[in-house]
Image (cartoon, rainbow, N blue to C red):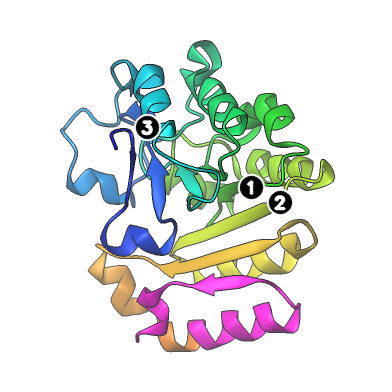
């Protein structure tokens, strides 16, 4: 396949299939793994992949309805500001639904995604997720300066839940364990599934946190509220 692919390494814990629509991401998250591989101007603009829709259609023809869930996306957020005009993500979701394929969205774009909830709503093979790692906007503004605000992302998850769309939240990378715990406590009525993973590539932060203690605390909380969750191997293998 082409624009739909099988993730490798740690990414495989999130999805067996994935699809990235844009090259580059204006969210500019400082913890993003993509910066390890990207060109210097990766955060300056979001450029759609050449002939993306026609390439997607060709990939879809090779899949059947029982294929693994397709995640949009691992890098190049599918709801960056440019998507408001290009509508490539919307078109991609329409194609996936028309072909009865399972998919999930992961974004920090907040309410920009609400425009497309009509595609996810009532379709039992679709899920909607967002990344949230802070409760304090000042921290979010520092680490993920171009992403939607915390409140905007929270309200978008609540909106998806209210419309019957299965929801999930990725708390990765955990940078402040206390804020991660607070997210679970406050959002648990609206979130159907949680994924949690520790920060990587920032040794000074990694070394300052008791990760085993955090792992046990977050696991205890998730079990206490009866949540469906997945702790990434970065935590479970400690």
> What x and y, as percent, mark residue 22?
36, 27
| Residue that badge 3 annotates | 59
Q: Is residue 76 visible?
A: yes
Q: What whole-number distance in Å separates the C-alpha atoms at marks 1 and 2?
A: 5 Å
Q: Is residue 32 left or right of residue 184?
A: left
| Residue that badge 1 annotates | 127
Q: Is residue 42 left or right of residue 13?
A: left
Q: In percent of the image, x 47 and y 27: which residue is there? A: 80
Q: In percent of the image, x 64 and y 42: which residue is there? A: 153
Residue at the extreme right of the image, as rendered:
162
Q: Is residue 159 above or below residue 68?
A: above
Q: What whole-number distance in Å separates the C-alpha atoms at marks 3 and 1?
A: 21 Å
Q: In percent of the image, x 68 and y 29: which residue is there? A: 119
How busy is the neighbourhood of tag 1: few (under 14 within 10 Å), some, or many (20 plus)? many
Q: Is residue 46 above or below residue 152?
A: above
How busy is the neighbourhood of tag 2: few (under 14 within 10 Å), some, or many (20 plus)? many
Question: Which numbered marker is on residue 166?
Answer: 2
Q: Quadrant of the N terminus?
A: top left
* Residue at disc 3, secondary structure: helix
Magenta segment: does it hold 227? yes
The reply to whether discs 1 and 2 touch (Cβ–Cβ < 8 Å) is yes
Q: Is residue 184 above or below residue 37?
A: below
Q: Quadrant of the C terminus?
A: bottom left
- Where does the magenta region start and end? 215-238
> What x and y, as percent, mark residue 167?
68, 52
How busy is the neighbourhood of tag 3: few (under 14 within 10 Å), some, or many (20 plus)? some
Q: In percent of the image, x 29 and y 78: which residue is there? A: 207
Q: Which is nearer the N-term, disc 1 or disc 2?
A: 1
Q: Is residue 141 left or right of residue 150?
A: left
> What x and y, as percent, mark residue 45?
32, 22
């Amino acid at each position: 396949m082409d624009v739909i692919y099988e993730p490798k390494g740690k990414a495989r814990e999130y999805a067996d299939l994935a699809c990235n629509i844009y090259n580059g991401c204006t969210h500019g998250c400082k913890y993003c793994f993509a910066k390890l591989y990207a060109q210097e101007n990766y955060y300056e603009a979001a450029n759609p992949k050449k002939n993306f829709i026609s390439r997607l259609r060709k990939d879809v023809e090779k899949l059947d309805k029982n294929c693994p869930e397709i995640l949009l996306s691992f890098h190049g957020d599918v709801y960056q500001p440019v998507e408001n005009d290009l509508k490539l993500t919307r078109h991609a979701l329409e194609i996936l639904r028309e072909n009865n394929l399972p998919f999930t969205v992961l974004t920090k774009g907040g309410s920009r995604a609400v425009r497309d909830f009509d595609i996810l709503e009532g379709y039992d093979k679709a899920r909607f997720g967002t990344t949230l790692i802070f409760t304090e906007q000042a921290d979010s503004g520092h680490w993920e300066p171009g992403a939607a605000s915390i409140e905007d992302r929270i309200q978008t998850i609540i909106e998806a839940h209210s419309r019957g769309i299965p929801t999930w939240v990725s708390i990765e990378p955990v940078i402040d364990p206390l804020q991660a715990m607070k997210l679970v406590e406050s959002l648990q009525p609206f979130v159907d599934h949680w994924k949690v993973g520790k920060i990587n590539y920032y040794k000074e932060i990694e070394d300052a946190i008791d990760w085993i203690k955090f792992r046990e605390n977050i696991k205890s909380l998730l079990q206490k509220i009866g949540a469906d969750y997945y702790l990434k191997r970065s935590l479970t293998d400690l």
